[in-house]
Amino acid sequence: MKEEKGSASFHRGFGLVRSAVSSVLALVNEGKNRKEVKEELALGPDQFTAAVNYCERSGLINQAGISDFGQAALANDPTLANLTTQWVMHYYLSAPRRYSPNYWAFLTTDFLGTPEVLSTTALGKVVVSFAKETSGQELKERTGETGATGFVSTYAQEEGLGALGFLEAKGGGQYQVTSPQPLPAAAFACILADYWPILAPQGEATVELAAITRGELAQVLHQSEAQLNALLAELATPSAGLIQRQRLYTPYTVTRQRLDAATAWDQLYA
């Protein structure tokens, strides 16, 4: 887990723009360093910083270069338009374990699942309060609202992750929370494989079903218990063989079989 530094402004107030992020991804894949990437992209300094940070935070690149997810996306969905790609990006942006404290994860788990109207002003105040309570950081209201703007812009704009269907812009800084698009089983397999070490920190092959269907992961993905059980059933079919479910006696469990990161990424776009 990384410590947050400037967490509320890592995106410089810009929402995720897939065209910019995919351009960064392609150039990193060519072996270019940050300076070379910046020289090739016609972006302002803040826009460039936002694009690079989003590329990293959405799991496409890491300190070593392009990630396994990034390689799979670049080969199969270079514009990052596929819902499968966007779901995995959402997971990496929103998983609380990746940065601490993670205001983005907090907004995702606490606000995207409630069918109400959100405002950037109100969410900005939430960001300020979250920073103070979790790290003692005193943010200005403007910084908090900048953080909220980056968040809602990402999920409401088509050029961001708007296709996932979490938010609908209402005008005047107001956004309606809506029910997201179905989570593809292939994306869920990759997400579950990546999340497994959190479920089983000692390397256990078996975990309780409720830890998946009722825990933090369910909150990040905003999938109901029934939806997650249906997805797990797909991963447990004989043709998939990624997991095995035990539901004869309590506690119900899920056992990892062929569910590993390498297998999951290979099958992401199959």
Image (cartoon, rainbow, N blue to C red):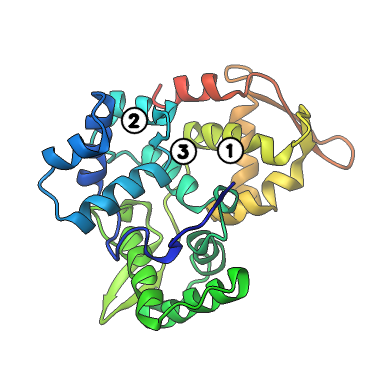
* Nearest to the observer: residue 77 or residue 243: 77
Residue 3: image location, x then y, percent:
55, 54
Nearer the N terminus, badge 3 or badge 1?
3
Residue 66 in sight = no
* Alpha carbon separation for disc pair 2 and 1: 21 Å
Residue that badge 3 annotates: 184
Residue that badge 2 annotates: 73
Residue that badge 1 annotates: 231
Between disc 3 and disc 2, the foreground one is: 2
* Nearest to the observer: residue 128 or residue 137: 137
Nearer the N terminus, badge 2 or badge 1?
2
The quadrant in which the C terminus is found is: top left
* Nearest to the observer: residue 245 or residue 196: 196
Total number of numbered discs in the rendering: 3
Asked if 205 appears above or below 22 in the picture, the reply is above
Nearer the N terminus, badge 3 or badge 2?
2
Q: Residue at x 28, y 26 (%)?
A: 29
Q: Amino acid at mark 2?
A: Ala
The reply to whether callout 3 and callout 1 are in contact (CB within 8 Å) is no
